[in-house]
Amino acid sequence: MEEDMAPSVTIKDRIIQYMNQTLLSTLVTVVHGRPVSRMMLFGNDKRGTVWLCTRADSSILDEIRQFPHVALSIFREETLLDEIVSLSVEGEARIVEDPMDRLSLEGFDILGRKSPRIGDIPHAGEADRYRIVIVSPTLFRFHSWADHVKGVPPVTLRRKSGASTI
């Protein structure tokens, strides 16, 4: 992210833009009081809600059922060090149990925009093998390498009480 962006671009805009342009995240759940992380493809909407897809028999689902507060680190490899950005998201995860529910289909669509293979799951007749997980963010922490070098701390945005957006 460049420092000389137009003043009309807010940090919220930068976060959503970064999410839109990024495919990978590390999802962190809690198992027996300890963090467990794994790489996941993710989708997002314009409000910053994160959409994940996992197998219906994945241990991730049991972990979320037991402790729905999760964290994600969203990243992508950059060519130049100055372009590296760190985005972490904390939020409450919920599982859409019915793979043909409206929210599941919306999730497959959102994911399909980034990864056609995932987005095609319901159309391939195998939707019952997968579950959509929706993470409603409560906190975003955004930090560029350029700011880090200057000693500028990360920007932290908290979701307003009762709001479904950042």
Image (cartoon, helix red, strand yellow):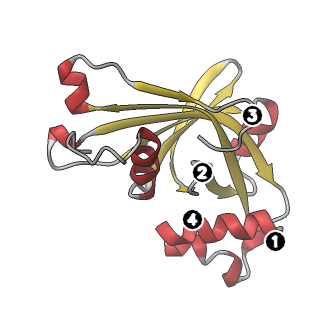
Q: In the picture, which quadrant includes the N terminus?
A: top left
Residue 32, relative to residue 46: is it above or below?
above
Kindly identify which residue carries mark 4: 111
Label 3 to label 1: alpha-carbon separation: 22 Å
Report the front residue among 21 and 116.
21
Is residue 157 found left or right of 6 in the rendered image?
right
Q: Residues within 10 Å of mark 1 (few under 14, many from 20)?
A: some
Q: Position of residue 120 (x, y in %)?
A: 60, 78
Q: Residues within 10 Å of mark 2 (few under 14, many from 20)?
A: some
Residue 97, relative to residue 109: is it above or below?
above
Query: In terms of sequence position, does the residue under pointer 2 or pointer 1 come before the other?
Result: 2
Choose top left, top right, bottom left or bottom right for residue 29.
top right
Kindly identify which residue carries mark 1: 100
Kindly identify which residue carries mark 3: 68
Query: In terms of sequence position, does the residue under pointer 3 or pointer 1 come before the other?
Result: 3
Label 4 to label 1: alpha-carbon separation: 15 Å
User: Looking at numbered disc 1 in the image, what kind of residue is underneath it?
Assistant: Met
Kindly identify which residue carries mark 2: 47
